[in-house]
Image (cartoon, grey):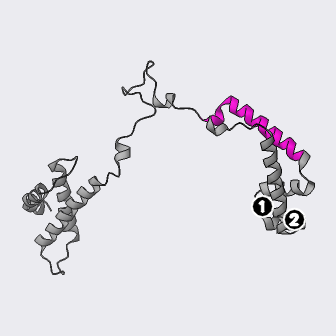
Amino acid sequence: MNRIVERYRSFVRLKASSYFLVGGEGEDLFQEGLIGLVKAVRDYRPDREASFRSFVELCVTRQIITAIKTAARNKHTPLNTYISFSQTRAGANSDQEMSLADVLAGDPVNDPVTQAISAEELGSLIECLGSVLSELEAQVLTLYLEGRSYEEIAELLDCTPKTVDNALQRVKRKVGSHLEGREVIDLSSR
């Protein structure tokens, strides 16, 4: 293998010098060419009607071109140009400069005000549902919230799937009316 590499080294260097790799050096393409040479040695089959030299040329050229195309794809650009959330612009955490994670807004679900308003809204909705839903509507809603299908609910309540659908439509209208009657705060816009 060493003799083959020494014999074709100048050929690989010459082949690599005729190409350009954006953001890379000439040595990078030379290394890719050597990888192509190793693949040629590994994959060459004398029973095919190609000479070893022509097979080496093909493998080296393809390896170099593949490396150029891969580099030009910019597939890894987002990873290579990312901005750390936990580091300051200077690169080290300091008490004087805030990191991006410190500047970004926190999760609104963890906000105590949001939690209090959500709990109040939920309590109001449960109270409303308890007073305005019929027994059938309440049963259908409970089973539906458990993840059961219309058919399963209909079988359990001894009614038709259409009855289940109608009950759920009435529940939706009643919940919608309840929410319209209250001044609901849109927490997602905060």
Q: Amino acid at mark 2?
A: Leu
Name the residue rendered at 82%, 44% in the picture.
178
Q: Which mark is residue 156?
A: 2
Q: Which mark is residue 148?
A: 1
Q: Position of residue 183 (x, y in %)?
A: 76, 36
Give the left or right position of residue 99, taking residue 113 as reference. left
Establish if 99 lies above or below 170.
above
* Res 113 → quadrant: top right
Label 2 environment density (alpha carbons within 10 Å; few <14, some 14–19, many ≥20): few
Residue range of the region highlighted in magenta in the rendering:
107-130
Secondary structure, mark 2, is helix
Name the residue rendered at 32%, 51% in the picture.
74
Q: Position of residue 69 (x, y in %)?
A: 26, 58
Give the left or right position of residue 70, taking residue 151 as reference. left
Label 1 environment density (alpha carbons within 10 Å; few <14, some 14–19, many ≥20): some
Q: Quadrant of the N terminus?
A: bottom left
Name the residue rendered at 80%, 48% in the picture.
175
Q: Position of residue 133 (x, y in %)?
A: 89, 51
